[in-house]
Image (cartoon, rainbow, N blue to C red):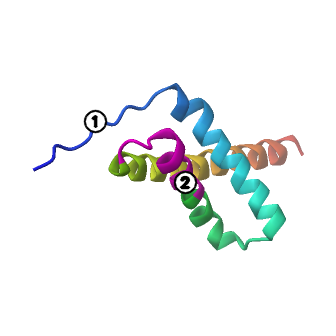
Amino acid sequence: MEPFPVIHTNFWDAVTAVPLTIILTQVFKIMLSIRRPFVPTLANVIGLIISIFFAHKGNIWTGIFMGFFYGNAAVGVYSSLKTSIIAYRSRKS
C-alpha cells in the first residue's frame, strides 16, 4: 500500500497560488461573462490546473488536494473582502 503523500503548505501556496487563482478567476469572469453560480467551480478548476501542472506536479494526489485548497481559499478570500467592503461602505453613509 502506498503511504499518504506529505503535503506541505508553503510560501507558494499562501502568497502566489491563491492570489493568482483570484486574479485569473476575475479575468475569466469578465472575459467570458460567467454566471455567478459557476464562479466557485471556475476557481476550483483554475486552482486544480495551477496545483497539478505547476505547484505539485510530482504527485497527483497532492496536486488534487492542494488544487481544491487553492480554489476554495480564493473564493473565501474574495467573498470576505467583498463583504468587508460592503459593510464599510454602508457604515460610512
Seen at 33% across and 51% down, the residue is: 61
Q: Which residue is mark 1?
A: 6
Q: Earlier in the sequence, mark 2 or mark 1?
A: 1
- Residue at the spot x=77%, y=44% of the render? 85
> Could you tell me residue 5's position as x and y percent?
26, 41
* 45 relative to 60 in the view: left or right: right
* Residue for badge 2: 49
Position in image of residue 82 (x %, y %): 72, 49
Residue shown at the point (73%, 47%) measured from the top left? 23
The three-letter amino acid code for the residue at tag 1 is: Val
Q: Residue furthest right?
A: 93
Q: Quadrant of residue 56?
A: top left
Q: Taking 7 as reference, is 93 above or below it?
A: below
Residue range in magenta is 46-59
Cα distance between the residues tagged 2 and 1: 20 Å
Image coordinates of residue 36 in percent, x first then y, are 69, 70
Instruction: State if disc 1 and disc 2 touch (CB < 8 Å).
Output: no
Q: Residue at x 69, y 55 (%)?
A: 25
Q: Residues within 10 Å of mark 2 (few under 14, many from 20)?
A: some
- Prevailing secondary structure of the magenta residues: helix
Q: Is residue 35 magenta?
A: no
- Where in the figure is residue 3, as x and y percent of width and height? 16, 43
Q: Nearer the viewer, residue 35 or 16?
A: 16
Dot 1 lies on which element? Answer: loop
Residue toward you, 57 or 85:
57
